Amino acid sequence: MSTAAFPPPRISLVTLGVSDLARATTFYQRLGWPQVANAGDGVSFFRTAGALLSLFPSSDLAADAGVPSAGDGFRHIALAINVASAQEVDAALDAAVAAGGTLVKQGQQVFWGGYSGYFADPDGHLWEVAHNPFWPLDAAGLPVIPES
C-alpha cells in the first residue's frame, strides 16, 4: 500500500465559470497570457507558470458538477499572482484595468509586511497581486516559502 497522498497534493487546472466566454477570453488575451491553441469549442485554456487556467461558461460548469448555478457576489475565493516588487503590483493592476478588469483594491502596504492589491476580471473573479518580501520567487516566478 502506498503512503503517497491521494489525491495528489497539486492543482492541475483552475476553472473559472464565466458569463461570456468570448469576453473573458479576450480579457486574458489582453493581459498577454499564452492561450492554448485548439483546446476545443466552448472552453478556453491559458498557460501559467503553474496550473492551467480554464474558462468555461458558468451554467455549463454548474451542470457538469451537478449543482445549481451560483448567484452573484463574493465567491469565497481569490486567486493570487506573486510578483517581485511593489512597483510590479501596481503595474499588474494597471494592466488588468487596461485589459477590461476592475480595480477592487489599490496596491498598498499590508499588515503582514508585503504590498498587495486586487482586481476583478469581467465576471468578478478576484485576483490578488502581491509582493511578499519574505517569499523569493523561483525561476518560474513561483513563490518559495521558507521552511524555517
Image (spheres, grey):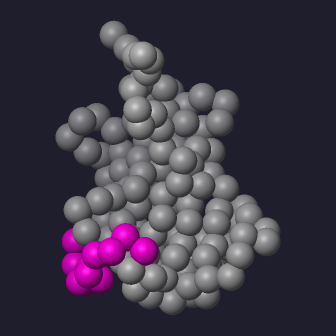
Q: Which residues are magenta?
A: 64-74
Identify the residue at image location x=34%, y=39%. 114
The location of residue 148, given as percent across then percent down, is: 33, 10
Q: In terms of image quadrants, where is residue 110?
A: top left
Is 110 on the left or on the right of 38, as rendered?
A: left
Q: In terms of image quadrants, where is residue 7?
A: top left
Residue 40 visible (yes or no): yes
Instruction: Judge by depth and name the residue closer to the eye, 56 or 31.
Output: 56
Tell me if residue 92 comes above or below residue 55 in the rendering: above
The location of residue 1, given as percent across then percent down, is: 42, 16
Identify the residue at image location x=54%, y=72%. 55
Magenta stretch secondary structure, dominant: loop
Is 133 on the left or on the right of 45, as rendered?
A: left
Identify the residue at image location x=61%, y=76%. 43
Identify the residue at image location x=58%, y=44%. 50
Instruction: Judge by depth and name the residue closer to the eye, 136 or 20.
Output: 20
The location of residue 76, given as percent across then percent down, is: 23, 62
Tell me if residue 50 comes above or below residue 46 in the rendering: above
Instruction: Examine the structure image and report whether residue 92 is included in the region drawn in magenta.
Output: no
Instruction: Examine the structure image and report whether residue 70 is included in the region drawn in magenta.
Output: yes
Count of labels shown? 0
Q: In terms of image quadrants, where is residue 64?
A: bottom left
Is 17 on the left or on the right of 98, as rendered?
A: left
Residue 133 visible (yes or no): no
Tell me if residue 33 comes above or below residue 38 in the rendering: above
The location of residue 46, given as percent across then percent down, is: 65, 62
Q: Residue furthest top?
A: 148
Q: Residue furthest front?
A: 1
